[in-house]
Amino acid sequence: MLQFTTTEQAYPQTREAAARKLDFNEISAPFNPAEAATQSSRCSQCGVPFCQIHCPLANNIPDWLKLAAEGRLQEAYAISSATNSFPEICGRICPQDKLCEGNCVIEKGFGSVTIGAVEKYITETAFAQGWVKPIKITRESGRSIGIIGAGPAGLAAADMLRRQGHALTIYDRYDRSGGLMIYGIPNFKLDKKIVQRREKLLRDGGIKFQLNTQVGITITLDDLRKKHDAVLIATGVYKPRALGISGDTLQNIFPAMDYLTASNRKGLGDKVAAFDSGTLNANAKRVVVIGGGDTAMDCVRTAVRQGAASVTCLYRRDRANMPGSAREVKHAEQEGVVFEWLAAPAQFIGDGAVKSVEVQRMRLSAADEAGRSNVEAIAGDTYGLDADMVIQALGYDADDLPALFNAPELRASKYGTLAIDAQFMTTLPNVYAAGDIVRGASLVVWAIKDGRDAALAIHARLSVEARHVA
Amino acid sequence: MWHEDFDTRAAHLAANGLYSPADERDACGVGMIAAIDGVPRRAIVEKAIEGLRNMWHRGAVDADGKTGDGAGIHIQLPQAFFADYIARIGKQPDARLGVGMVFLPKKHFANQELCRAIIETEILRGGYSIHGWRQVPVAADVIGDIASESRPEIEQVIIAGRPECDEARTERDLYLIRRRIENAVRTKAINDFYICSLSSRSIIYKGLFKAEQLTAFYPDLLDARFVSNFAVFHQRFSTNTAPAWHLAQPFRVLAHNGEINTLRGNVNFMRSHEANFTCDAFKGAEDDLRPVIPDNTSDTGALDAVMEILTRAGRALPLAKLILIPPAWSKNKELPPHHRHLFACCNAVSEQWDGPAAIAATDGEWVIAGMDRHGLRPMRTLVTRDGLLICASESGMVQVEESDVLERGRLGPGEMIGVNLLQQKLYYDYELKNYLAAEKPYSQWVGKTILLREILQQTTRLGRSKKRATPEASHLLKRQLAVGLSMEVVEGIIHPMATTGKEAVGSMGDDAAMAVLSNQPRPFHHYFRQNFSQVTNPPIDSLREARVMSLKTRFGNDGNFLALDDSHSEIVLADTPILLAAEMAAVLQHFKKRITRIDTTFALDAAGNGLRQGLDRIVAEAEKAALSEKSFVLLTDEAADESRASIPMILAISAVHSHLVKKKLRKKSSILVRTDECSDVHALAVMIGSGATVVHPALAEDTIVARHAHGLLGELSSEQALDNLREALAQGLLKIMAKMGISVVSAYRGGLNFEAIGLSRALATEFFPGLPSRISGIGLSGIEARIRKLYTAAYPKFAADVESLPVGGFYRLRAGAEGHAWTGENIHALQTAVTKGSYQLYKKYAASVAASPPIALRDLFDFRSNAAPVALEEVESVVAIRKRFVAPAMSLGALSPEAHEVLAVAMNLIGAASNSGEGGEGPERFAPRSNGDNANSVIKQIASGRFGVTAEYLNSARELQIKVAQGAKPGEGGQLPGFKVTVEIARLRHATQGVSLISPPPHHDIYSIEDLAQLIYDLKQINPTALVSVKLVAQSGIGTIAAGVAKAMADKIVISGHSGGTGASAWSSVKHAGVPWEMGLAEANQVLTLNRLRHRVMLQTDGGLKTGRDIVIAAILGAEEYALGTASLVAMGCLMVRQCHSNTCPVGITTQDAMLRSKFEGTVEKVVNLMSFVAEDVREILASLGVRSLNEIIGRTELLSQVNRGGEELVDLDLNTLLTQADAGPHARHCTLTARNEVPDTLDAQMLEAAGEALAKGEKIQLAYSVRNVMRSIGTRLSSLVVRHGGAAFDEQITLQLRGSAGQSLGAFLARGIRIELLGEANDYVGKGLSGGTIIVRPRPSSALVPHANTIIGNTVLYGATSGALFANGQAGERFAVRNSAADAVVEGCGSNGCEYMTGGNVVILGEVGQNFGAGMSGGMAYVYDASRTFEARLNTESVVAQRLQSAYWEAVLQHLIETHARETSSPQAVHILSNWESCRSNFWQICPKEMLSRLPHPFSDIATHSPLQKRQA
C-alpha cells in the first residue's frame, strides 16, 4: 500500500471514441488483475478516510482496496458488499469524481486512487468466481414487507430486509424491475444484463416480484397494508420539469425520460413504436439537449450512438458549475458532442415541429449560499441554433402520490416528496418511504443508501414489535 | 496548625480528589562506612555526619524552605553512653543494654501513654525488663515549620539485657517484641507511632530535616561516646509530598537510593508468602510476624521489612539482598557455574523487588552496599589505609586524605561490597558471592528444576503432540465476532506480529473515544491504561538492554519463604509466559494430577446476571482447587458458543488471583489461561499484570494458522509465524514492563501496573484491589449487556450469517464505528476557516467539534457561572490570550523543515512559543531573518537523545524543556529510521546521513528525582535567563511527581494527555499508555496547591486541544498555558492520514521526501488564524462566564459541572474527583512568578568576572580553585558567558585548574575555548553535553593509586556530547560516552553499557569494559584495550562489529589519541602501551557500527576481506 508516491494513476483502458460511438456497449475495459492490484496499492490507508466520508453508502473503501491490492478479492467483495447492495452498479455509474475519488487525499498532486474501477473489478470477479450467492437465511422471521417500486431504493431495502429473515414482495408498475437503472441509464454506462443478474439473485434469495402492478389502479395501498407488516414506498420521481418558455409545445421536443426509455427498451429487444417511427430516434438529426446533469449526459451520448447529425448540449452555467460528472462531459466531448456553456434556451422556434432554438448567452453572478454561482442573462446576446430534436433534461419532480395512491393521509412536502420521520415512517402507520420520492431526484447511490437505512429502521421496528408480541 | 491542617486537607483530597498517599516513593543520597577490623571508633560517626552534610544537594526542601524530606543515621548502639545514663538514674546494668528509639504521638497524650504501656507490656512479656525512658534531647528550632508541626515525641526506652542471652538471641527477641508492639498499636488504631529501632546492637537517629541539620537536631550524636564500627546514612528526596517523620531513612536494615517499581505485586505476593511460612527462629510466634509489611510505609520501608525478616530468620544479609534484589544473571555469559546456581536458587525463593536501587544495609554482622541489576544509581567505593570501607552516592562526600586512600572503586550492576564485622573481613563482589555459594549445595538443588522445553521435547518424542488442525472458517469467524475482533485488528495488529515478529506501528495521537464513553462494545483490556516511569525512576530499554530483561516463568514454587533449603528449586521453568497450544498441552499433561479446569463462560439464558453468577462460581472453584491437591487452575473460555458467552478473561483472572491472595492461597496455585481474548500486546500485559501465570492466546494462534492455510503468510511456515507471534507478544510485554522500569516478569505479575478508567468503583474494588480507578463507570451489568450485544451479532437468530468481520474503526476512523475527535467534517471546516481567515467559519468548526458525541472526559462537562456575563470588550485581548498558546514539541525530523519553520515563525509573530522538539535546530534560525521573520523556536527541548543539544542551542532559548515523557508513548524511546536522516537532519543531530538514530527510553542523567534537580541546575547554569520546564505525561500519582519536580526548582510543568501525537510508535503505546490530561492536570494542580507549591510553578497542558472550550476547561482544571499540536498541523493542511511513520505524508508535513515536501501548503497566516480564532473563542466564553481574564478562572473548578454521565449501561460515571479544590491558603491558585526560580550559585560565580574581561579583550586566562563534591556544574555558567560572547577567540582561552573532588556535572555543556584540568576525581555526568571544551582528570600528585585500576570519574560521562575532548587517567563508571555525538575521549576502563547509543566521536578505553558494550551504537568509533580477554563476552553485537586493528589509518587515529592522553594526563598505562606498541597493539579491539561500515571515510580494514568478530561468532 501507499504506493502513490511511486506508482502513477491509471484508469482501465477506454475504447476509442470513434469505435464506441458505433454501439451501446460499455466504454471501458475491465482491469486485469495486475492493474487492479497495482492501482489499489496506491491507497494511502488514511486515518480519516475522506473517500468513505464522501461516499453516500460510507463504503469501507480503504479496506477493500487493501484486500484487492493483496489479491484477496473474495474478502474484498465481502467487505464491499457488506455496505452496498449493488457494488457492481455503483462501480459503473457513480460520479466518483464528485464523491470518493474527488475527495481522495492524494487526488491533489498525485491523482486519486481509481476507486470505481476497482470496485467494479472486485464485484465482477466475485460474480465470475461464483462468490456472489443468493441470500440464505437461517430461518424465516414470519414477518412480511411490501415494497412499492423496484428501483435502487426498493431493491436495496428488499435485499437488507430479506437478510434479516423477513418475507418480501416488491411491486412495480413497469414490466421490468430496476426502475431508472433499467430504463433510464443507457447501456454504455450500465449494461442491462448487470441489473437483471442482480434481480435474479434477489429472486433466488426468496424475494417475490409482482410487476405490472400500479398502486391505486391494480392494487390499493390498503390491500398492501393489510397484507404486509410494513410497506415501503420507493417509487422514485418521474414527473419531468419543463422550461415553460415560448414554443415548448412544438413537436419533437421531448422529456429526457421518454427519450432514454425508448432507447433502452430497444436495447432490451422490445418493440417501441415511437422509436421505430423515427420520432424518438435521433438518427441523422440535429439534436439539442438542454441541461447539465447526468441525465443530459446520457441523452447526448445516446444521441451520438443513434447516429445524430450533430449533438449540442446547452447549459446555463459553466463547466465548473455543472451538476453532472466532469468525467461524463469528457467522454461526451470525445464522442463529438458540442457543449454550449453559459447558454440557455430563450424560445423554441418552429412550425409544428421545432426548427431551431434561440439561445440566450449568460454570465455568472454572485455565488449563492452553497457557493454555487448564479447566472444572469447578458442582455441582447442571443443567437439561433438549428434543431430537429430537442431533449429537455431538466430534472424530475415528484408525482402526486397521495392522489395516485388514493391516500390523502399521506403527507407530502411542498416539493411533492413524501414526508417521513426519523425512522422513515410516513404519516401512515407502518408505511415507510425512501429514495427519490423522499429526497427528490438524486443519484442511484443515494437511493441505495436510503433503501438500506429504511430497511434498518423497518427491521428495528419489527423486532421491537416482535418482542412486544412475545 | 499546619500539620493537622495538612492532614485534614490531604485526607480531603485523598477522599475526593485525585491524590493518593499510596503513591509515595523515595529517592535520594545514601552512604555507609564500615570498619574492616570491626573496632568501633568515633571517626566513623563523624565521617558519616560529614557525608550527610555533603549531600544536601541530593535532597529536597519543602515549600517552607527549611523542611527537608528527611535524613538519618544508623550506627552501633553506644553502650557506654546509655550505661552512663542508666547509672545517673541510679541503676546498674548487668548485661548489654537494648535501646528503642521511638516516635510517640506528640499531641494526643492519652495515646502517647497508651503506646508507652504497650511497649512496656510487650518488653516484659518478651522476658526483658526496662531500665527506664529517656527523652531524647532535640533542638526543635533548627527544623522547618512543616517538620516542626508534625514532630513526634521522641523518646528512648532502655531495656535491660539478659545475661544468659547472647547478642544474636537478644536481637531476635527484640525483633519479635517490636513486631508485637507494632501489631498491638495497629489494632488500637493509633497514628503517629513508630519505632525507628529497637536493638541492643544498633540505633537509628532520623527525622524530617535536611541532612546538615542532623547533629543540630540530635545533639546526642556530637557526644564522643557515640562510637561505632559502622554507619549507614541517608538523605531523602521523596517524590511524596506529605513530609513524614517515620519515612525518613535509614530503616532497620537498609537505606535505599532509588525506587521500587514492583511494589504492589511484591506486597501481594508477600501476603501469600507469609500465609504459611514457618521458621525455627520464631517457632510458634509466626503469627506475630504477620503482616510482614506494615501499611502506610514507603516502597523502601516495605523492602526493608522483608529484608529484615529474611535476615532475622537466618539468612545472611548479602544473601537476602541476592534474593530480593538479584543481579541480571541468566544471560551473563561470563558467570561461573557456582554463582549461576546460587542465583537460580535465590530466584526461586521470591519474585524480585525491581527498580533502581543502590542500598546500604546492615544486620549487625554484615555491613554491605549493593546495587540492583540495572546499576542506575551511583555508588562510589573507597578503602582507606586505616581499614575503612566507605561507600556513598558521590565521591568526595566523605573526605579522606589522598595519601590515606588505598583504592577508589564503584559498584556496577548487581554488585555488592561488604564487611563482615565478626569475621573482620572485607569482601569484594566476587568473593562475597563465592562465600554465599559455598554455604549450601546450590548446585545440587538447582538440578531439581525442570525446564518446560525438556517436557515439550519429551512429549514430542513420545508422539503425543497432535498435528495442528486448521480451524474451520465459519467457526473461527464466529469466535472472532464473539470477542469483538475486527478486520482492523486481524490485518493491522495480529498479522504484522505473525509476519514480522514485531508490533505494528502507527502515528499521530489517540483521538478515539475512551472505552467508557464509547458506544461500541470494547474489549475489556481497553479500560486499562498502562502505567509508566517518569522522573522518579527510569524506564528500561528492553531492546538494547535485553540482558537485564527476563520472562522466565516458574510453576509450582510454593516452598517456605523463610526456609533456606531445596524446596524452592522443585519447579518447572518456562522461558516465557506465552504458551502456544502444544506447550499448553505439554504443561497440562505434565501437571495433570495437579490441575483443576475452570470454565470461564456463562450461560446466555441466565437472565441478566450470568456474569456475576459465573464469577462467583469461578472464584469458588479456584478456592476449592487451591485447598486441594489439584491447586493449579486452568481458566479456559473454549466452551464459548452460541449459548455460552465468555466472561472477560482479565476479570476472571483478577477475580481468581485477588481472591487467592486474599485467602493467602495464591502461592499454592499457578493460574494457567487459555483465551480467545488475547489478540494484542496490551491484552496480554493486562492478563499477566492481573495475575496470570501463563497465557495461551488461542484465537490469535488459530487466526494465524487459518491465515497460513489461506496462503496469506507468503513463504512463512505456520510454525515460524507462530514463533513470530510469540516473539512479538514477548517483546511487547517486555516493553510494557520496561516502561515501568520492571525487568523481570515474576515481579510484574499480579502487580496491576495499570490505572483503570471507567470501571465502576465497586467492580474495581472487588476484583482489582489496589488498582487505581478514579473515574467510575461500567459495572458487571453493563459489561454483561455489552457482551450480549456481541454474541447476538455473532450468532444471529434469523438473519443470514455475517460473512466477514466488521472493518473496525478504533485505530482509524470508519463510518458507523468508534467515535474519533478528528473527523472529515471538522478537519475540513477548520482548514476552510483558517484559509479564508473567517472567524464565522471557525465557529462552525467549533460547533461541529462540540456537537460530536463524547470522546474525552471534558466532553461531559459544561460551564456554569452565577456571575452575569460581561461585555466582550472588557475581556483581555486576543493578543494577550494567544501568548499563552504553544506549538508543542515536534522535532525537525518528525516534521518537514517547511512545516517546522512555519510553526516557529507564526508563533513568534504573535509572541507565543513554538518548541524545537528533540531534533536540534540550525544556528541560522537563532536570529531573525532580514525580512523580520523569526524562525527560532523559543522553547528548546532537551530529550533523552540529546540530539543537537549544544551550549549554543541552549542559549538561544527563552525556555528549556526537559521532555521526561511523551503522551503518545510515555516511558519509551524512539528511533528515527535511516531513510529519514537526510543531510540536513544529520547536520542538526550531529549524525551521519542515512544512519538510524535512537533515543533511549530514559534520560541517562535522570534516574531519580535528585537527578532531575541536577539537570535543572545544569540548565539554569548554561542559560542564566531561561525558564526550565519539565514535560510529564498524565498518570495516577502525577501530583506527587509534580510536587517533586517543583521542589527540584522547575519553573513550569507540562502535563501531556495520553492522546498526544507521535511520528511513530507501537499501536499498543499510542492507544493504551497514560491517562487523559484532564485527570493528570487536575491531580497535579490539586497536589501542588495542597503543598503550597502551585504559585511558584506554571502549569501547561496539551493533548487534543481543539477549540476555545477546551482551553477554558484546561484553565479551570489548573493550566495557564495550552499547547495545540494536532490542531496546528491540521491548520497547516494535515488530513490525519496517519502515515507519518511511512514518510509518505501526502501534504508534505511529516515527511523528508523532497517531492512530498513540495506539496506543503501550510502558511504562517493559517497558523496565526487558528491561534487568533481560538483566542477569540476563549474571550467569548470568558465573557459569558462573567470574567475578564484567564488568570481569574485558573483552578476555579466551581465553574464546571458534569452534564452527562455517559451511556445508559454505566453505573456512575462520576468526574467529581476532577473538580475537587485544594485549599490554596494565602497563595494564588495560579503561578505568580515574575522571574524564574533561581538556584544557588556554584563555583562559576567566582569565575565570571575574571573570565568576562579576558573574553572581551581576547586574552587567555588561567583560574585555579580547590573543589568539593557540593560544587556542581563547574564550567557551565562560564560556558554560557563564552557562547553569549559569540564564542571563544581560540581554543583553551580559559583554563580552569581544579583540585579535589568535583561535584556532579563537571564541565557540563563546556564550550569551546574552556579547558578544565582536574587533579582529583569527579562524580557523575562529567562532560554532559560537552560543546567543544576539553576536560582532563587525573589523580592528585600525592595519590599512591594505580590510576587504571581505580575509578576516577562517575556514571554517564559525555552524555550527549557534541564536540570536545575528555582524557581521564582512571576508570569511568556505567554508561560511559552514552549518546556521544562527536567528542573524543580516552579513559582507562569503564562500567557497563559503554558507548551506548553513540553516534559519533572516537572513544578509547585502555582497560576493561563492563557488560553490554556498544549497544545501540550507530556512529563513531571505539577502541578497547583488552588485556584481560574479557571484551568479546561483553560486546553487544546487535549493531556493531569488532575486529583487531586492521587499518593503518584508524590505527594512527588511535595512536594519536593515546599520545594526547599520555601528554595530558601522564598516564602510566598510556605510556606503557605506547612504548610497547608492537606487543600491545594486538590487545586492541576496534568497534564500528554496522551501518557505518559503508560510509567510513577510510575503510575499516586494509585487508580485502576482513573477518569481524560478528561473523566469527555466527
Image: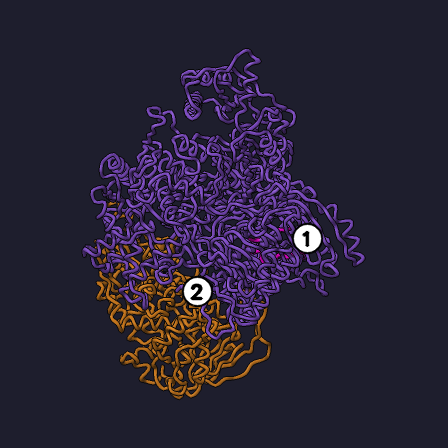
Chain colours: A orange, B purple
Is residue B31 found inside the magenta-colored segment of the image? no
> Which of the 4 image quadrants contains residue B379?
top right
> Which of the 4 image quadrants contains residue B531?
top left
Pick whichever, B492 or B531, lies toward us. B531
Badges 2 and 1: C-beta atoms under 8 Å apart? no
**Image check: A342 left or right of B923?**
left
Decide: is A171 above or below B755.
below
Decide: is B112 above or below B1336.
above
Specify start and end residues of the magenta stretch as a single range.
B943-961
Pick whichever, B1389 or B987, lies toward us. B1389
Indicate the chain on which mark 1 is placed: B
Tell me the amino acid under the disc marked 1.
Ile
- Residue B884 position, x and y percent, is 63, 49
Identity of the residue furthest to the left in this view: B463
- Residue A174 position, x and y percent, is 28, 70
* Element marked by disc 2: helix
Q: Which residue is mark 2?
A: B1510
Q: Which residue is mark 1?
A: B1316
Is residue B952 found inside the magenta-colored segment of the image? yes
